[in-house]
Amino acid sequence: MGIKTKIKLLLADSYYLFRKSLVNILNDDDGILIVGDIGVSDNISSHYFNSNPDVIVADMKQIFEEAKNPITYLIDNNPDVKILFLAEEFQDDQISFALNIKADGIISKDITESEFIYAIHEIYDGRKYFDNYLSSDRRNDLMKRVDKNQECMDNDTIPLLNYREEQILKLINLGLTSAQIAEKLKLSKRTIDNYRIGLKKILKVNSRAEMMVLAHKYFNNSN
């Protein structure tokens, strides 16, 4: 009898105790091997290429809020990567982001241990796995929004933004300061400042005024 192949899995979540709880759950499955458990702010790409996991399990909100999104970089450089997102809430912007980057699954953190393990095996076997809350109709509706955004950007040569970047640019367009945006989105001012720097590079502008001109053009074309 041959040796059973184990699913190599990388966990990415910024909460240490939660992450260790997942490790304890997954260690009970003899078909899964944890090759790494790291925080979202750690170098996910480096850990991925060093450990070569079959599946990445990551917190959707934490990944979504990263200014320099590590999962997007990974997918751009390795389209075969398989990703299962864990969600506390099913917010449209986060789900759209996950669908846009071709996530293999999205499940609630409030699920049973057996369903969690089942989802991992399904994704490893090449199938998608979505929480029952995410009906196919809702997923299709969100993907239509993603496609509309892509079409607008293609027609006007403005780079496609991810959902957090677009959200922040919209608030910049309304004249809000970094502090006001941080308060509204419940993020740190430093995070917003980092997004502003990133948006300037993406949009190839040097000043706030230039950014607002392009933001106005962006949202006029997206309506």
Image (spheres, rainbow, N blue to C red):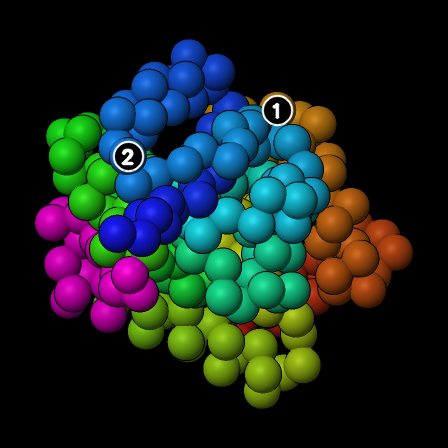
Counting from the top left corner in percent of width and height, residue 54 is at: 45, 52
Q: Position of residue 214 (x, y in %)?
A: 70, 66
Residue drawn at (74%, 50%), measured in percent from left and top? 198
Residue 96 position in % (x across, y down): 37, 58
Image position of 56 (left or right of 112) = right
Question: Residue 1, relative to residue 62: is it above or below?
Answer: below
Mark 1 or 2, which is nearer the eye?
Answer: 2
- Is residue 184 within the magenta segment? no
Q: Is residue 96 visible?
A: no
The kind of secondary structure element at disc 2 is: loop
- Residue 188's tag is 1
Q: Residues within 10 Å of mark 1 (few under 14, many from 20)?
A: few
- Furthest residue in direction bottom, as rendered: 155
Q: Is residue 127 magenta?
A: yes
In the image, what residue type sits under mark 2? Asp
Q: Residue furthest front?
A: 1
**Mark closest to the chain's N terminus, 1 or 2:** 2
Q: Nearer the viewer, residue 74 or 8?
A: 8
Picture quadrant where residue 88 is located? top left
Left or right, 206 with respect to 151, comes to right
Quarter occupied by the C terminus: bottom left
Q: Could you tell me which residue is drawn at 33 percent across and 69 percent down?
A: 143
Judge whether 197 appears above or below 17 on screen: below
- Per the rendered image, the range of residues in magenta is 125-140
**Looking at numbered disc 1 in the image, what kind of residue is underneath it?**
Ser
Question: With 139 as the anchor, is 68 left or right in this view?
Answer: right
Task: Return the residue at label 2.
Answer: 30
| Residue for point 19% across, 45% down | 118
Q: Quick check: 135 above or below 8?
A: below
SS under mark 1: loop
Whether residue 122 is visible here, answered yes or no, is yes
Alpha carbons under labels 1 and 2: distance apart: 41 Å
